[in-house]
Image (spheres, helix red, strand yellow):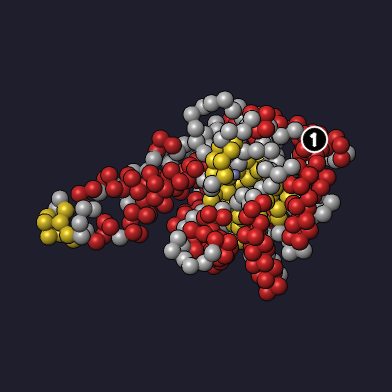
Amino acid sequence: MSAFTARPTAKISAPRRSVRAVRTRAAATVGADFKPGVITGKEHLALLDHAQKNGYAIPAVNCTMSPIINCCMEAAKKANAPMIIQFSNGGGAYMTGKGTGAEATEAAVLGCVAGALHVRTIAKTYGVPIVLHTDHCAKKLLPWFDGLLEANEKYFAENGEPLFTSHMLDLSEEPMEENLEICAKYLERMAKINCFLEIEIGITGGEEDGVDNSDVAPEDLYSKPEEIHQVYKALNPIAPGMFSVAAAFGNVHGVYKPGNVKLTPEILKKGQEYVKAQENLDSDKPVKFVFHGGSGSSTEEIREAIGYGVVKMNIDTDTQWSFWDGVRAYESEKKGYLQGQIGNPDGEEVPNKKYYDPRVWIRSAENYTVDRLLKAYDDLNAIGALGK
Ligand SMILES: [Zn+2]
């Protein structure tokens, strides 16, 4: 039994099957080089270099509410590792509230800003470095991106750093030339406030946050070394090292039965070798890669991808499930105490308040999610990363 399965609601058992034995150091301490709380700019770059050098990747979790944000930081603290908290456009809008009168772009911007400020207010108390990021932004969502950059620029003017550490632009549906042209234009603007850019080339299969790539041709699910080099040539001169690439190597959003698509991390290795040779570089890993659509991948596949320079792995589907699974398990175990405000198996007049308080059943969702994230940290070779 791992140290992480002991919990206040002892009767709610952890999903042990999905959690391998993970251990933290007896005295977990933040590595001397990284300050606790939100990190940006050079510190963030140093963290990504640290990950590449020590062979681990950082989980990036899509957050849609404060309990999910908080359990990300709780998991990071337990793993003594960094965490990337990210918001999608839809996640931001949800943070603002489904009943808001704001129009869609404004709701998405405000919700992301609110989430970022929540993180910034409490992150230091968890004692680990946190990266603030936003997820896929397709061409039609660029007004959202503009709103986020305006918030960053305002925050930078007041605090000397951007509100968010990094953002993703996903123009992979556009022709490569246009993709890189728009990314280069935005990176110029972001470089002025030390903000980092993640871009996407090729296509991640499957469906996420309303973008459906379920029907694309199989060959489009794999990036070519030349394309990875094109990204390097377009972006590195603008802001050296301040970008990462979500390349396509057969990854698919969502969870499906094993199918036609085969994960091929070797594509990333070939990309690194090609860029190194073409640019005459010393580094074996000149490109920072991001792994999207990794749900259902084996630990071996994940570790192989990390070996080729993946520093960030997105997690959404699996934590959506763990959060629900915690509620499901709680309701199943306490069913008799959850059917009315008064009256349960202990007596007709016994109140149930302590069972239906959201802090109790959502805590079960949080516990399950912390456990799922510790499994992710283990897959990503990131348990105790800050002590490396
Ligand atoms: Zn993605």
Quarter occupied by residue 37: bottom right
- Furthest residue to the left? 348
- Vertical order, 265 against 35 (above or below): above
Quarter occupied by residue 314: top right
- Vertical order, 377 against 300 (above or below): below
Q: Can residue 127 be seen in this view?
A: no
Residue type highlighted by circle 1: Glu
Pointer 1: residues within 10 angstroms few (<14), some, or many (20+)? Answer: some
Residue 309 screen position, x and y as percent? 70, 39
What residue lies at 48% left-to-right and 29% top-to-bottom?
257
Tell me the residue that label 1 is attached to: 226
| Numbered label tally | 1
What residue lies at 58% left-to-right and 49% top-to-bottom?
60
What residue lies at 26% left-to-right and 56% top-to-bottom?
355
Q: Can residue 290 be seen in this view?
A: yes
Residue 222 screen position, x and y as percent? 68, 32
- Furthest residue to the top? 260
- Furthest residue to the bottom? 158
What residue lies at 26% left-to-right and 60% top-to-bottom?
354
Residue 28 versus residue 102: which sits nearer the camera? Answer: 102
Quarter occupied by the N terminus = top left
Residue 134 screen position, x and y as percent? 61, 55
Numbered disc 1: secondary structure: helix
Left or right: 89 in relation to 337: right
